[in-house]
Amino acid sequence: MKKKRALIFGVTGQDGAYLSKFLLNKNYIVFGVKRRSSIINTQRIDDIYEDINYKSNFVLLYGDLTDASSILNLIKKVNPNEIYNLAAQSHVKVSFEVPEYSADVNGLGTLRILEAIRSLNLEKKVKFYQAGTSEMFGKTKSKFQNEKTPFHPVSPYGVSKCFAHWITKNYRDAYGIYACNGILFNHESPIRGETFVTKKIIQGLVRIKQGLQKKLFLGNLYSKRDWGHARDYVEVMWKMLQQNKPDDFVIGTGKTFTIKDFVNKAAKKIKLDIRWTGKGIKEKAINIENKKIIIECRARYFRPLEVDYLKSNALRAKKILKWFPKKSLDNLIDEMIEHELENNND
Ligand code: NAP
Ligand code: F7E
C-alpha cells in the first residue's frame, strides 16, 4: 500500500517532534517544515533524523508561515494527504510584546495554508489540522470548558488563535475542506520550551537541589491550568483527521491545578522541603533544610491580563474519537524530573 504523506508546520517544536515520531511509527512519510535560524534549532528532532529506521521517511524542508510563496511551493512539492499546522509564536506573555508578529504567524499563517490548499485545488484531497488552544476561552466564566463554551481571549496570542479557529471553520464550510480545529489545553513534556512555567519550575528546582542554581523567579502562582502530556495530545490530532467528517474537539484532562500546586508537587518529588511565606509579589519559598530563599516572585513574569482558570471537559473526544489521556500530572512531573536529572549528569 502507498504510504501516506504528512506535512508538519512547526516540526522543530515540542508537538512537532512527538507528532513526527507518532506518524513515522504509523508508516507515514513525514515532511517537516523548519524555518531559518541563526543557530541549529533541530535538537528535538535530531534523534529522528539520525535514526536509520526513519531516515528516508523523514524529510526536512525550509519554509515560514509569514511567507505565502514558501507555503504554496511546499504544499505543491510535497502533495500531502494530511497537513498539521503546529507552527506558532506560542508564548502568551511574548505575544503582548510582539502582537503584530504573533497575529501574522498564528492568524494569517493559518489563512495562508488554507489559501494554498484552495489555490492548488486540493480541497477534496488534503486533510488539515489546526492547533487551537484553551487560551481562546480566556476570561471564561464556565466551570469547565467544552466545544460550546464561548471564546473570550485576553491576549494577542489568544485573539490570533481565534482568527485561526474561525478561518479554519470558514474554509471547511465554504469550500468543503476536511479541516479540524483541536482546542487543546496545556500539554507539557521533558522537551517543553524552557520559558513555559512547568519546564522552568522543574529545571529550576532540580538545579537548585544539585547546587547549580540559587533561586527560581516566577510570576502569578495562583492561575489554574489543566496540564496533560504532549505525547497523548499528538495522538488525538491524528485521530481527528481519521474520522468520516471533520469537526472541532476540546482536548484536556479535566483536572486543574495552580502553579503553586505544581511547584509543591515537584519540590516534594525532588525532595526539597519548602515553606511558603509572604503575600502577593512578596510571596517566596524557603528551603527548610538550609533556611535559604529559593523561590521569589518577579513582576516581569506577570502578564497585562491573565487567564485565571482553565478546566476542560473533553467528553466529546472521549465518545467520538475514543481518546483518553494516559498520563496523569504526577506521571508527567516524574518524567520531566527524570529527564532533567539525566541531562544534568551528562
Ligand atoms: P512550540 O514548541 O513553541 O513550537 C512552535 C513551532 O512553530 C516551532 O517549530 C517554531 O519554530 C515554529 N514556528 C514559529 N514561528 C514560525 C514561523 N514564522 N514559520 C514557521 N514555523 C514557525 O509549540 P508547541 O508547544 O509544540 O505547540 C504546537 C502548537 O500548538 C502551537 O501552534 C501552539 O500555539 C499550539 N498549542 C500548544 C499548546 C501547549 O500547551 N503546548 C496548547 C494548545 C495549543 P522554531 O523551533 O524555529 O522556533
Ligand atoms: O504559563 C503562570 C502564567 O507560559 C502558565 C502555551 O503552550 O498553554 C501555554 O500557555 C501559567 C500562566 O503557559 C511564570 O502567568 C507564573 O498563568 O507555561 P505558561 P500558558 O500561558 O498557559 C496554552 C494552552 C497555549 O496554547 C500556549 O501556546 O503560569 N506563570 N510564573 C508563569 N508562566 C511563565 N511562562 N513563566 C513564569 O515564570
Image (cartoon, rainbow, N blue to C red):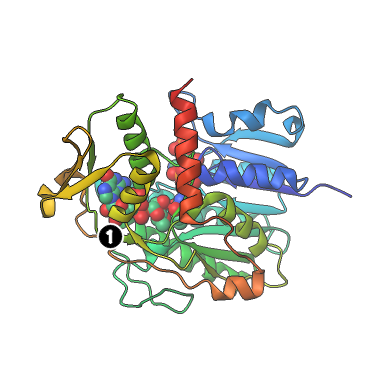
Front residue of this view, candidates 292 and 300: 292
Pointer 1: what residue? Answer: 223
Q: Position of residue 145 (x, y in %)?
A: 42, 73
Q: In this rendering, would 78 be left or right of 249?
A: right
Front residue of this view, candidates 94 and 313: 313
> Which residue is drawn at the image coordinates 61% and 71% (left, top)?
318
Q: Callout 1: few (<14), some (14-19), or many (20+) C-alpha neighbours within 10 Å?
A: some
Occupied quadrant, residue 246: bottom right
Occupied quadrant, residue 57: top right
- Disc 1 CB within 8 Å of nearest ligand 2 atom: yes
Q: Position of residue 281 (x, y in %)?
A: 12, 50
Q: Residue 44, relative to residue 346: is it above or below? A: below
Which residue sits furthest right? 1
Which residue sits furthest top? 346
Q: Position of residue 75 (x, y in %)?
A: 65, 46
Q: Residue 346, relative to residue 173: is it above or below? A: above
Q: Position of residue 262 (x, y in %)?
A: 35, 52
Residue 118 seen from this side = no
Residue 337 seen from this side = yes
Front residue of this view, candidates 188 and 60: 188
> Which residue is drawn at the image coordinates 67% and 47% (left, top)?
22
Residue type indicated by callout 1: Ser
Q: Secondary structure at mark 1?
A: loop
Q: In this rendering, would 243 be left or right of 138?
A: right
